[in-house]
Image (cartoon, helix red, strand yellow):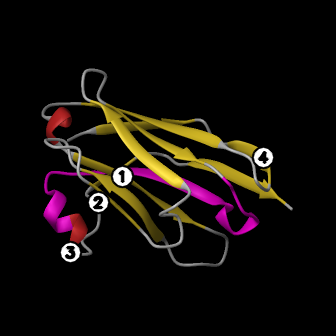
Amino acid sequence: QVQLVESGGGLVQAGGSLRLSCAASGRGSSRYAMGWVRQAPGKEREFVAVINWSDGSTYYTDTVKDRFTISRDNAKNTVYLQMNSLKPEDTAVYYCGAHTSFRTVLAGGDFGSWGQGTQVTVSS
């Protein structure tokens, strides 16, 4: 089982930037695909981005593709989400997730492990 701890959320004005971090620990955690989902009040949970552990392949949902960048530091077992040009509709709780299979996540599968979430609020 992998443990995930997020940090970096906060309040920012529209057009601003934030960087989220997620530190993973536990057996095999360095070999997990890691990514982010978000959930806004009253809405369904939404996939945001995922990165593969082996070759750094990434995938984004269309609404963030040109604004957010996911990256990882395998030596630190940490994944980052750089969020630029933030919009009020990006306001949500962001959860870090991990899964042993990058392909499963790409196919729409859910992450198997989750962090506690971090609030991102974008004011207009």
Residue at the top extreme of this rendering: 75
Q: At which x and y percent is residue 68?
A: 52, 53
Q: Amino acid at mark 1?
A: Gly
Of residues 56 and 49, the one drawn nearer to the viewer in this rendering: 56
Image x and y of residue 33, in percent? 22, 49
Residue shown at 14% from the left, 51% from the top? 100
- The quadrant the N terminus occupies is top left
**Residue 35 - label:** 1
Q: Earlier in the sequence, mark 3 or mark 4?
A: 4
Q: Is residue 41 above or below residue 93?
A: below
**Residue 12 tag number:** 4
Choose top left, top right, bottom left or bottom right for residue 60: bottom left
Q: Which residue is mark 2?
A: 111
The amino acid type of the residue labelled 3 equals Ala
Residue at 74%, 47% (x, y): give it. Answer: 16
* Front label number (2 vs 4): 4
Describe the element under mark 2 as helix, strand or loop: loop
Check residue 104 in the rendering and tell me which mark sits there, or answer none: none
Give the left or right position of residue 122, taking residue 101 as reference: right
Proximity of marks 3 and 2: CB atoms separated by less than 8 Å: no
Disc 3: which residue = 107
